Amino acid sequence: MEKVNVAVVGCGNISGIYLENLTQRFHNVKVYAISDLIEENVQAKSRQFGIERIMTFEEIIADPQVQIVLNLTTPPLHYPLCKRALEAGKNVYVEKPLSLKYEDGKELVALAEKKGMLLGCAPDTFLGAGLQTCRQVIEAGILGDIIGATAFMVCHGHESWHPGPEFYYKKGGGPMFDMGPYYLTALVNLVGPVESVSGMTAVSFPTRTITSQPKYGQIIEVEVPTHVNGLLRFKNGAIGNIITSFDVWGSELPRIEIYGSRGSMIVPDPNCFDGEVKIKQYFDGEFHNYPLITENSANSRGIGVSDMARALLTGEKDFRASCKRGLHVLEIMEKIHESSDQHREIFLESTCEKSVPLR
Ligand SMILES: NC(=O)c1ccc[n+]([C@@H]2O[C@H](COP(=O)([O-])OP(=O)(O)OC[C@H]3O[C@@H](n4cnc5c(N)ncnc54)[C@H](O)[C@@H]3O)[C@@H](O)[C@H]2O)c1
């Protein structure tokens, strides 16, 4: 099978599952090279996945064999590294969020278009069995017209487990920029694009204490809101709300629920590929499970990269984890924060199409 050469930039925490899937599961890609500024990280991944070619970022973007640069660095590096790679004529797939700022994201999308390159953006969990099943439920009309949606991601932050959690509390971090992409991508793919947003945000704890190793006991100064509430007015008239928080010790809220004129649906965790889909139509006494329709229920991170490789191999321009959706999600997140600062509803500039369902 013809394969697309992917070079992975950033061999940190999330790279393991990508490298596992891209080397063992998705057969239309080849991990051509890996890169990290930390020698220990790149050597460990080289040994674990048998990838011999270790390169610097500059060597990667100068190498004509590299077809996709997979940017798995932390959020502040998404914009500058994607920009350099696109300028060098590379297709790029980047972890979420697309950039820290909507204006920067817009510039990347325009640059990709100008250069004729594909630009993809995580998350790709909406291609998993759980969220694809939810999509089918909606497309089949089982819920009727969609009138509302709720999304909740509340926890007490990542400093108890992530080895380097500082970035979660700096510009580009916070619960909305960290976890919002999963929830908003799911909502946009299920309900449709958003027209306007309102937001209220707070910093409940101005400092955080790291309790993971190796930085146990270090204090982080919090620079971004960590309790973020947003209202969403979708283009199709539905109204939604999203709460993302690193300030909550416990909750029994659902992840996502979708409400239609004929019934309701409980959507599985959009940070995962599987999970239970439950529906209750107007004539049902209670919720019941709806069977999952596709096989991608294991952790399939990288499926978006593989889908982008499919587009490159077939010459099609369309692929599912597109930067247009990543840009729309980025604008929603940014404008929820701005709405809170400005005390007003904000209408969005960007939009996107729902992606074609996986069959
Ligand atoms: N950690 C998770 O569970 C998780 C889950 C989903 C998505 N993500 C996303 O994945 C991205 C990375 O997160 P992470 O947790 O793996 O971060 P991390 O800090 O563990 O890893 C990032 C790596 O990028 C490397 N790097 C930075 N600049 C580089 C350069 N110029 N060339 C080569 N390597 C470079 C760093 O040395 C580091 O090893 C973030 O955008 C995050 O939002 C993380």
Image (tube, rainbow, N blue to C red):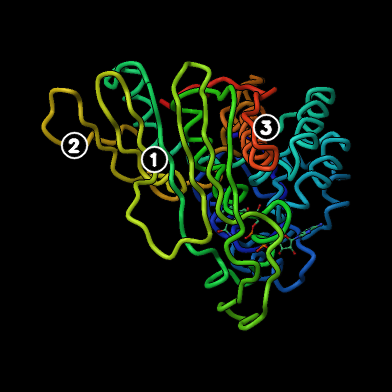
Q: Residues within 10 Å of mark 2 (few under 14, many from 20)?
A: some
Tell me if residue 61 comes above or below residue 246 in the rendering: above
- Ligand 1 within 8 Å of the CB at mark 2: no
**Tag 3 or tag 2, which sits nearer the N-term?**
2
Look at discs 1 and 3 and give the one toward the viewer. 1
Q: Position of residue 87 (x, y in %)?
A: 88, 35
- Between 205 and 89, the one lying in front of the other is 205
Say what amino acid the circle numbered 2 marks: Phe
Quadrant containing ligand 1 reads: bottom right
User: In the image, what residue occupies the spot 34% across and 31% down?
Assistant: 133
Residue 162 visible? The answer is yes
Q: In the picture, which quadrant includes the C terminus?
A: top left
Say what amino acid the circle numbered 1 marks: Ile
Residue 240: quarter of image: top left
Q: Position of residue 79 (x, y in %)?
A: 79, 44
Q: Residues within 10 Å of mark 1 (few under 14, many from 20)?
A: many
- Between 328 and 274, the one lying in front of the other is 328
Q: What element does badge 3 sit on? A: helix
Tell me if residue 224 comes above or below residue 289 in the rendering: below
Q: Which mark is residue 20?
A: none
Q: For the residues marked 2 and 3, what is the alpha-carbon distance in whole angstroms?
A: 34 Å
- Ligand 1 within 8 Å of the CB at mark 1: no
Q: For the residues marked 1 and 3, what is the alpha-carbon distance in whole angstroms?
A: 21 Å
Q: Which mark is residue 327?
A: 3
Q: Which residue is mark 1?
A: 256
Q: Which residue is mark 2?
A: 287
The residue lying furthest to the bottom in this view is 217
User: In the image, what residue occupies the spot 76% across and 58% down?
Assistant: 35
Q: Position of residue 320 (x, y in %)?
A: 56, 28
